[in-house]
Amino acid sequence: MQLADQVLDKGDRGMTVQMLTTKAEQAILKSFEDNATDLPGGTAVAELRRAAIGAFASKGLPSRRVEEFKYTDLKANVKDVLPLAVGDASGSAGDGALSKHFAALAENAVSFVDGRGVAEKNGNKFLAGLLSSPPTWIMSALADKELAASADLLLNTALFTDGAVIDIAAGAEPTDPIVMVTSTPNNALTALRHVIRVGKGAKVTIVEIEQAPRTAGVRQSSALTQIEVADGAEVAHIKVVEARKGSLHLSHGQVSLGANATYSPFHMTVGDGLVRNSLNVFFNGQNTTFDFAAASIVHGTGHADTTLVIDHTVPHCTSRELFKTVLDGQARAVFQGKVIVRPQAQKSDGKQMAQALMLSPDTEFDSKPELEIYADDVVCGHGSTAAEIDSDLIFYCTSRGIPAPVARAMLIESFIGEAIAKVAHDGLREALTVFARESLTAV
């Protein structure tokens, strides 16, 4: 409790503080105290960090008693916290080179190694260099009060060391995707914050890639991406996480959508680590479309959690969510999708579907669709399925000369491919298909 007291002595003593009982929680507070003077930012950002760590001290890591973390108990699963990477290692742009599956995207890749950016491309900036006197729109994003509700986001605000600042001009249509690749070193924690603004009528594809270490080892990472999409803009946003056993990745997207906009995110998670990808989307303008798809391939004792909150605050908006997961070994996948339709959001159209293919009797799929509807003129629905491979389909294939292992692989790839097919960019869709196909050899 001593470290929590030290934090709260500096302006937050009015808070009610619970006892931080775990080694990981104490390590987080100590990491902040040890690195506070090395974290980027002027007075305003330092005060924001101090308030965030104080609020974290009052909450602790979320446990299953917190509804949003019912199936992903961080207090129980995070046993310790690794040292924070603050860019003092000998990282280089080469360390952040893209894996073979996505090497074709390297031309526009912004790389982060050891918690700091090492390669700027096409005028995009690193957040650390702007924090001594941040522009108003960036400071407003960093201080977003919506991000104070969850302890994992407070952790990011307190500890983030860098991130990408992407400002797409009105009407701009970059030909190639803008790529952010993070390479977290073994036995370290990285915390990155990305701030993105897409101007009116612009069209852009943004890709985030979280790569596993090239050598054996564990890592921990926190990534928080804030996106403001102006009226009439079209944004495709692909997030890829490669998770290795013993590693932890906490990711969150906070997205604000203007009128007549289209936001199409796709999440892919593969491996056997602990991953939680959350996304909050707010409709702030009418006639806007949100079209989400996700594909996860989890094996061993891996745990992949996808949690969405879609907030229809205005009329005439559409939301779609498709989640697919393939599970083997003792793997566990979670899908939580909450769609909120406010009283004034008449003519809202929201649908979601979550499906799991379970290749082992020891796997677990937790699906929790939620609809909170306060309007009476809406079309909303949800569905969820969990099943094994259909033996009749295997028999059908083998009866036509297809070997059983090949038939099994074809059926699995077809199942996961329905989600990947929603990626519009041809090159990215093909790269994701190959990445998924190779990942499926582990299940």
Image (spheres, helix red, strand yellow):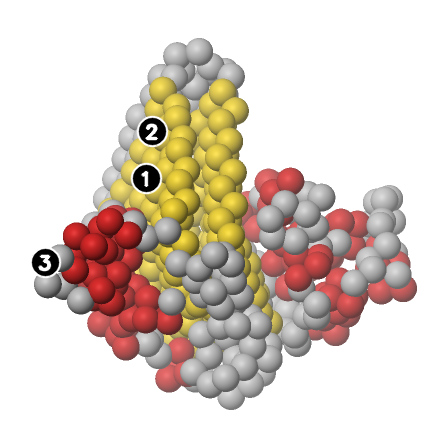
Of badges 3 and 1, the one in the foreground is 3
Q: Is residue 189 visible?
A: yes
10 Å crowding of disc 2: few (<14), some (14-19), many (20+): many
10 Å crowding of disc 1: few (<14), some (14-19), many (20+): some
Q: Earlier in the sequence, mark 3 or mark 2?
A: 2
Coordinates of residue 259 in the picture (x, y in percent): 34, 30
Task: Pick whichever, 278 or 182, lies toward us.
Answer: 278
* Discs 3, 1 touching: Cβ within 8 Å: no
Classify 107 as above or below 232: below
Q: Amino acid at mark 1?
A: Asp
Of badges 3 and 2, the one in the foreground is 3
Q: Residue furthest left?
A: 400
Q: Which residue is mark 3?
A: 400
Residue at position x 32%, y 39% from top?
291
Q: Residue furthest top?
A: 376
Task: Pick whichever, 220 or 30, lies toward us.
Answer: 220
Q: What count of labels does the image hold?
A: 3
Q: Which residue is mark 2?
A: 318
Kindly report the distance in space between the C-alpha atoms of the residues bearing marks 3 and 1.
Answer: 37 Å
Q: Earlier in the sequence, mark 3 or mark 1?
A: 1
* Discs 1, 2 touching: Cβ within 8 Å: yes
Q: Quadrant of the C terminus?
A: bottom left
Residue at position x 33%, y 75% from top?
98
Q: Which residue is mark 1?
A: 291
Residue at position x 78%, y 55% from top?
57
